[in-house]
Image (spheres, rainbow, N blue to C red):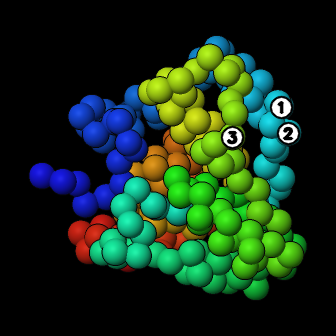
Amino acid sequence: PKPTCELLHGWERTGVSWWRAQTTRYFVRPQEWLEQSLKMTTEALGLQIPPDTISMHVHTDEPFDTMAYAAKLDDFFDEAENIRTVRPHVRTVFLTATDPAVLAQASSKWKGRWDILSLPLETALTPPALEGHAGLAHRMLLWLALHVQCEYFVVTRLSHFTRLVDEVRVTSGCFNRLVIALTGPPQYGK
């Protein structure tokens, strides 16, 4: 049966539980080669997560507006505004999405009100030799490493990727950071 939540393209046959467990392993037991690769890439891109950044990953593997329980981009930024109400110094959002239109919409609508950091899918990675599944895995690990550095999290429980961010957040000593879950299937609560 077709899953009711996000799976990364190309990873459907390996199973979500396997993928999430293998990915979490890299952060629970850090590997020097991975840390060096991620460090090289973030330095090459000049991307650094400042303190008090809000993490957002917008689920877009299916037509976004047709998904049951889908959270709209406005919902994410409404919750970011709620965080800012309590913490007025918060100005930065780290936003990832597999649909470039989401990043474009966020930039056109909220750039100026928010400092929006992102790493679009088409951004070249270091090392450049990574292609196919290896390149996708490297990008997802990079996204994950950057998201976990954030102080606040606005997520949807439909996304396996944001569930993974949450698992790594909890197991890496960041369990006391604020998480706002927008939506999810009824069995997971809202």
Give me the residue at 45% from left, 67% from top.
156
Q: Earlier in the sequence, mark 1 or mark 3?
A: 1
* Foreground pick, 27 / 75: 75
User: What mark, if any, has residue 46 been given in the picture?
Assistant: 2
Question: Is residue 151 shown above or below 79?
Answer: above
Q: Nearer the viewer, residue 90 or 86?
A: 90
Q: Would residue 104 be seen by someone viewing this image from the given angle? A: yes
- Give the vertical position of 91 relative to 11 (above or below): below
Task: Kindly identify the residue that appears in the image at 57 percent across and 75 percent down.
Answer: 73
Mark 1: amino acid: Glu
Q: Which mark is residue 123?
A: 3
Q: Residues within 10 Å of mark 2 (few under 14, many from 20)?
A: few
Which quadrant of the structure image shows residue 54? bottom right
- The 10 Å Cα crowd at callout 3, few under 14, some 14 to 19, many 20 or more, is few
CA neighbours of label 1 inside 10 A, class few (<14), some (14 to 19), many (20+) = few
Q: Are marks 1 and 3 in contact (CB under 8 Å)?
A: no
- Determine the secondary structure under disc 2: loop
Counting every numbered tag in the picture gives 3
Q: Nearer the viewer, mark 3 or mark 2?
A: 3
| Viewer-side residue, 118 vs 183 | 118
Q: Position of residue 165 (x, y in %)?
A: 52, 49
Q: Is residue 115 above or below residue 142?
A: below
Q: Give how far apart the Cα atoms at labels 3 and 2 are.
A: 12 Å
Which residue is nearer to you in this view: 174 or 13? 13
- Residue at horizontal 38%, vertical 42%? 9
Q: Residue 119: image x %, image y %?
A: 69, 47
Residue at position x 54%, y 39% from top? 140
| Residue behind mark 1 | 43
